Image (cartoon, rainbow, N blue to C red):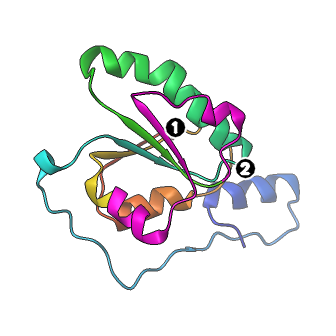
Amino acid sequence: LYPSQTEADDVMTLEPEVDARAITPYAFAEFAQADGEKSRRDGLLFVAGFAHTPNVDAAKWLVEEIMPLVWKRHPGLKVSLVGSNPNADVRALASDMVEVTGYVSDEDLRRRYESALVAIVPLRFGAGIKSKVVEAMQMGLPLVTTH
């Protein structure tokens, strides 16, 4: 069982005799309702576990290559890199415009989702459906991500 049809298809291409299937791995009892008060929201939010190499790459790509383009049009827009185990490369991204938090409590994470303008998931490699994507949708936060 795989968390996306793409992964199941890849497995069946590699091993045609395998019965690989996609499942929907996420279910929630409740969903947040976006309040629509854009004026009370601010900043971009990237939630990740930074012990995972694709998330480190994504954070660096976001801050070093994507945000300079965004800052040309929105110079005051801040970015929060929120999640456990930020290594030295991720911590080095911190600045007046980039917050690196390390681990935060569930309560703090919920508050961050409620106050962010947009969640961003700029992954260049990896596999599966990312829980950070599903979590942003569950929290009613607009999302920008790579395919």
Residue 53 badge: none
Q: Which mark is residue 51?
A: 2
**Among numbered discs 1 and 2, the one appearing first in the sequence:** 2
* Magenta part of the chain: 85-112
Which amino acid, mark 1? Pro
Q: Is residue 73 left or right of residue 89?
A: left
Residue farthest to the bottom, as pictured: 29
Per the image, is 26 magenta? no
Q: Give whichever of 130, 139 is nearer the camera.
A: 139
Q: Residue at x 75, y 52 (%)?
A: 10
Name the one closer to the observer, 137 or 94.
94
Question: What residue is at 65 percent from the left and 45 percent from the top?
Answer: 86
Residue 144 locus on image (x, y percent): 39, 42
Q: Is residue 66 above or below residue 101?
A: above
Q: Is residue 124 visible?
A: no
Q: Secondary structure at mark 2?
A: loop
Q: Position of residue 12 (x, y in %)?
A: 79, 59
In this view of the protein, which residue sits in the foreground, 6 or 56?
Answer: 56
Question: Is residue 100 rendered magenta in the image?
Answer: yes
If the image is split into quadrants, where does the N terminus sit? bottom right
Front position in the image: 69 or 111: 111
Q: Position of residue 132 (x, y in %)?
A: 50, 57
Q: Is residue 34 left or right of residue 90?
A: left
Identify the residue under disc 1: 122
Note whether 54 is above or below 109 in the view shown.
above
